[in-house]
Image (cartoon, rainbow, N blue to C red):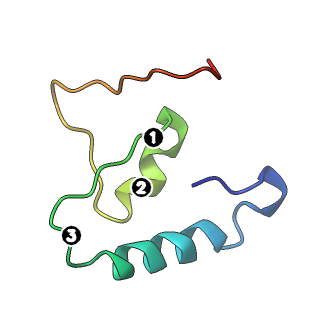
Amino acid sequence: MLVHKEYQSLGIGKRMMEQMLSRYSNVKTKVLISYDSAEKFYGIFGFKPEEGTKAMFISDMV
């Protein structure tokens, strides 16, 4: 989930997260990959880093 910098701090990301969490409330485990700068934002919704884990990617974009 990304919100364009010009539209950040308007509650758009918060509303998107609330809608996503509501839609998938029946899913017991939710996983996301976050930039360090967004960790506090996702923490508001109960997400927290998991010790001993590391995000890994394979992508043509990188």
On residue 42, the disc is 2
x, y percentage for residue 51?
Answer: 16, 30
Judge whether 19 appears above or below 17 on screen: below
**Amino acid type, label 3:** Val
Determine whether label 2 and label 1 are within 8 Å by CB. Answer: yes
Label 2's element? helix
Q: What residue type is labelled 1?
A: Ser
Q: Is residue 62 above or below residue 8?
A: above
* 4 left or right, relative to 37: right
Q: Which of marks 3 and 1 is in front?
A: 3
Relative placement, left or right, of 48 versus 59 is left
Task: Quarter of the image for the N terminus: give it.
Answer: bottom right
Distance, label 3 to label 1, CA atoms, is 19 Å
How packed mark 1 is, by other alpha carbons closer than 10 Å (few <14, some 14-19, many 20 or more), is some
Kindly indicate the quadrant of the structure image that contains residue 8.
bottom right
Point out which mark residue 16 bears.
Answer: none
Asked where in the image residue 60 lies, by quadrant, the reply is: top right
| Residue 34, disc | 1
Amino acid on which disc 2 is placed:
Tyr
User: Is 4 displayed left or right of 15 in the figure?
Assistant: right
Instruction: Determine which residue is flagged by label 3.
Output: 27
